[in-house]
Amino acid sequence: MSGPEGTGAGPVDTTAANPGGVKPVDAPGADAGGARPVDTTGALPATDDAGRAAAAEEAERAAAGDRPRGLLIDFGGVLTSNVFEAFGDFAAAEGLERDAVADLFRTDREARGLLKDLESGAIDTAAFGPPFAAKAGLAPERAEGIVTRMFSALRPDEAMGAAVRAARAAGIRTGLISNSWGDGMVYDDALLAEAFDAVVLSHEVRLRKPAPEIFTIGAERIGLPPEACVFVDDLPFNLPPAEALGMQTVLHRSAEETVPALEALFGVPLR
């Protein structure tokens, strides 16, 4: 999850043209995800059992070549409950309107600047708290620990976590790409250890989505080219830069939609 600002172009909702938000995958033999089609027409005819077995093996490899091999996925709002609902719970607890935090990020340039600086590691949560609390109309003493309180209502999405674990168990390389909020966003260490081959946190690499470089880092850390990866995020404007690198993308709305979409892309059960 990242801040609710766009990249200049309007948000791209892949669910509109494609249920589940999946970028279409070409038919076998087509150039899917930038991969060159495998030409098996020059193979020797299978005139015996060994030849037939070799031909079957080659066909399997060709089919596998059309499948992505890596899953890169967002954290907040994908592996957890909805981030904006958590912001609403925080706002209500602070005596504000439920939409106050989301509206502030959408409409106030300075608030968005604070968010960008926090996610990119330019400032820490201690530096973020006082000016953001003031922007939100909160008393100065409410600044301490404000980021932790903003995320305190987040809950893990067990179905999505199980799907990522299942993907890794099936041999799919898995990586987390998260616009982190310094030490204010708490990650599930057990999930990170069990489900992911690599983790990319924006405040550590000093880059934030939708910068294309952070997607490149994610692919590199799981040892794959971008065109061999699928990227999942809950914010539409984070998807086009990943697609421009050759990744297939899924716009997350719920586990009920995303998990079947990933099963179709990877060709393995994830439930």
Image (cartoon, rainbow, N blue to C red):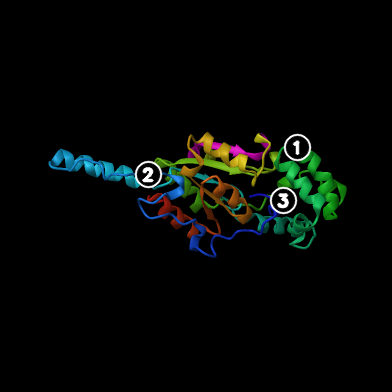
Q: Determine whether, in the image, residue 6 is placed left or right of residue 45.
A: right
Residue found at the far front of this picture: 42
Disc 1 from disc 2: Cα separation: 41 Å
Residue count near mark 1 (Cα–Cα under 10 Å), binned few <14, some 14–19, many ≥20: some
Question: Hey, which quadrant is residue 60 in on the image?
Answer: top left
In space, the residues marked 3 and 1 are separated at their CA atoms by: 20 Å
Q: Amino acid at mark 2?
A: Gly
Q: Amino acid at mark 3?
A: Met
Residue 122, label in figure? 1
- How crowded pointer 3 is (Cα within 10 Å; few <14, some 14-19, many 20+) is rated as many
- What residue lies at 84% left-to-right and 52% top-to-bottom? 135
Residue for badge 2: 65
Q: Is residue 115 toward the left or the right of residue 174 in the image? A: right
Question: Is the C-beta separation of discs 1 and 2 under 8 Å?
Answer: no
Q: Where does residue 145 sit, x and y in percent of width and height? A: 76, 44
Q: Which residue is mark 3?
A: 150
Residue 74 visible? The answer is no
Q: Mark 3 or 2 closer to N-term?
A: 2
- Against 124, is 230 above or below? below
Q: Which residues are magenta?
A: 193-204
Q: Is residue 170 left or right of residue 112?
A: left
Q: Is residue 211 left or right of residue 99?
A: left
Marker disc for residue 155:
none
Q: Residues within 10 Å of mark 2 (few under 14, many from 20)?
A: many
> Is residue 157 shown in magenta?
no
Mark 2: secondary structure = helix
